[in-house]
Image (tube, helix red, strand yellow):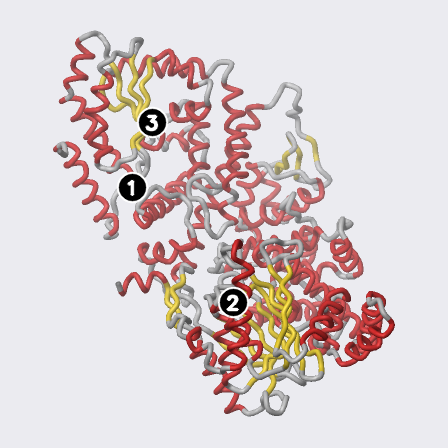
Amino acid sequence: MERPEAHNLIEKRKKLIKDFLAGEKIDFLGTLTSFLDEYFYTMFEKSVSARKMVISGNPFALIALGGYGRKEQCLHSDIDLLILFDKKVPMEVEAFIQELLYPLWDARFEVGYAVRNIKECTQMSFERFDILTTILDARFICGASLVYSSFMEKFRSRLSGKRLKNTLNYLLEHGENRLKNFGDSTYLVAPNLKSGFGGLRDYHTLLWYAKIKSNIKFRRDLEYYGFLSHFEYANLKDCLAYIWDIRNLLHHITRRKCDTLHFEYQTEMAKLLRHKNKTSQPDVELFLGELHGKMEFLKHLNQITFEDILSNCKTRKQVTTSRPTKTKGLIIKNRRLYFANTVAILQKPDLLLKIFLESGRSKIPLSIEAMRIVSEFRHLVDKKIKTDPRCIKIFKQTLTLSYWEFNVLTGMLSTGILEKFIPEFSAVVNKIQYNQYHLFPVDKHSIRCVQVINSFKKPGTTPITNLYAQVFKEIKNKNILLMAALLHDIGKSDPGKEHSKRGKKIAGPILDRFGFKPTEKEDILFLIQYHLLLAKSATRRDLFDEETAVSTAHAIDKIRLLRMLFLLTVADSKATGPKAWNDWTENLIKDLFLKTMGIIKTGELASKKAQGLIDKKKKEVLALSKESLEKEAIKTRLDSMSQRYLLYIPAKNILEHIDLYRNLGDRDFIWQISKKNNAKIRTVSICGRDKPGFFSKIAGIFFLNNIDIIASQAYSLGDSHILDVFKVKPPRDLIFEKEKWEKAEKDLICALDDDHFLDKALEKIPATLTVSSGKTPETNKVRIDNRASSFFTIIEVLTYDFPGLLFSVTNALYRNGLNVNVAMVGGKVDQVMDIFYVKDINNDQKILSDERLEQIKSSILNSLPQIYSKESRNEKN
């Protein structure tokens, strides 16, 4: 039976949550804390067990710990309690715990408790630092106040003694471990609101430090005792209120304690916040941008705390005297840069830029005091400073000194000086690109891109990193490349999709202001407008089609531009995040770069070089064959094969495929299934007669037998024979794998004989698809390119992945009289992009009729399921 005290607490909590969700301005954390306090007061007063313990000479104190002790009780936060006795812990305490906590546990509150006496609690506080920090947050609720005050006096006495330095060292180690375990939340699209850098733990660390050093009692004391300036404290209050609101809403959405703002919760969060959005930017991007700004400030506070802790932990041997730098007005003290005095800044505002250049050159970071001064004096960076050639030179030099290991540009960004010097950059500060593709906000991504390019200065440790270093060395004007890297995404300030063209327009006046020569400006604007060209061409076009490299060469035209565009492409992809950069992408971009370089250098097509490679490949295949009679037959077969096939396929595999062809006989197809090194992948090589819909029917048979396709390629073997190579996942039940392949083979025989055999598979294609992308999902898209290839119509299909996708699309192509000559099954992070090179089945030509192209496009779209978001489906239900 529910206790009336617990019932009263639950009802008041429900009302508080309702008011909070309705948008009423209330102190949610403090109010919920007071409700809990009231519950514990009442239960303590009515407790028979508590009365017995007090009467028998065992008074005790009920103490709030952790977040509850700080009066920061969020919706589903733990309630941590300490039941503290002076010396003896009586047996009756078990009955008291049942009276006090069972009603809360029954009501699904997460309550943790400890029962200790003063001696063991004091001892444990200095044996385990996680306990020490909870004691720093301890707050008396009710009971024997003398027990509480006696314990806190002993705790403070031991803390201020020889254990002080160890405690401060723990705070430093705790921060380093948090960064390793949870990451820098200001660099993550799915930040941890509590434990990541920029999360609430940064504020807690400052609070603990202030309690250790000055025994402050209230948050307001952070300003009174000089830990924060008035401006910083006001900003702290604003940031905490915002992040606590987000954390409470996250608890509400997940219905549990949760601190990581995962992708799938962000759109719902944006709706609950009810932001007044007067822009065309999605609500969720505005919300995440504001959140990242708040978390950036908390990270700044953490840096202040660490700097202060380090100065308090310094040994006697450390030099405390200052020494001048090569830059007049700047000094070095304790391995930190300081301004000699603030008067010098008023006289020479360019010191606000010079300090970052000095930092980059000497690899000495700015002190927190210097960071504060830069932030507070940044208004001095006026039009005169922004157009002063000396200041522009300082900034260009600083660009070359920003590395991931020593991040000068990030310091300029966090102090606001970067925005003052390039006001247009402010539009992308904390700008979120709302997808699972981009790891960093736009401003940090752009800075990361500069850092990656600077890393190419170092000699490589692998052939491909050696290539980056060599290409970088060959670039004469590095400033052009670095400036393009910094500004390549500045067009994302506008939510429109043509951010490259928009960026070119925004960057023009910046480059004029920076005094770039007309040819330099032209190069930078080209790099900004076409920074996606190499990546898109490499991943969406057939690199073994000579026209891919030719069209790329025509678009770029100059070797110096190709070199810079190549490194910008690599840096942009690396800075986007691991989902945008892998070995496959790296090799494709490298191959396209080398092929395009060859064409631009010679001014000719790559045919001669390609023919040389093909001749070499043929010799390798013949060398692998054993009998002389067999070699003649193989030579005849090789002469009939397509150049693309001979360029792409290794010699050993070509010989295996020729064996397949020779064993085909009168059959429609023959296949070979190989496991090779990766037991999780099967390679299915299928040689067959070039029947209409052959590729589509193979995809359909795999779908019918629950065999997932990972990648595929189609080749012509000449003489009306084709070879399709599929990478697939093996059947789920490996014990019966052989039987599964035998069934699939029989099904393919039936499908090739009966054009309606796969109708039952088509019925399994879903009509609708629900995706949990965290935002309004993208619609299905079909793009048709008739310019990139002289011989093929290229069709791009962009959709979300689902079982049977390849079959659904290729069946639509087949039903429209198209033959798939090349299939590139690939993907983005949150969606799938498949590319098909097709010809007309009847005349073996590309499709030129606009009417027919529209019909093909419509047919493919009709074959795909309608896309819905998980949130919209939930609303309908």
Q: Could you say which is closer to the camera, residue 856 or residue 422?
A: 856
Secondary structure beneath dot 2 equals helix
Q: Which residue is mark 3?
A: 65
Q: Which residue is mark 2?
A: 743
Which image quarter holds the N terminus?
top left
Residue 394 visible here: yes
Residue at 73% from the left image edge and 53% from the top image edge: 456
Residue 614 in picture, x, y percent from top left: 80, 73
Quick check: 152 above or below 379? above
- Distance from label 2 to label 3 (Cα)? 65 Å
The kind of residue tagged 1 is Leu
Quick check: 746 above or below 152? below
Residue 717 in picture, x, y percent from top left: 70, 78
Q: Could you say which is closer to the camera, residue 793 or residue 316?
A: 793
Proximity of marks 1 and 3: CB atoms separated by less than 8 Å: no
- The numbered dot on residue 75 is 1
Residue at 85% from the left image edge and 69% from the top image edge: 627
Quick check: 77 above or below 548? above
The kind of residue tagged 2 is Lys
The kind of residue tagged 3 is Leu
Residue 49 in picture, x, y percent from top left: 17, 17
Q: Residues within 10 Å of mark 1 (few under 14, many from 20)?
A: many
Residue 44 in picture, x, y percent from top left: 18, 22
Q: Could you say which is closer to the camera, residue 819 or residue 654?
A: 654
- Distance from label 2 to label 1 (Cα)? 56 Å
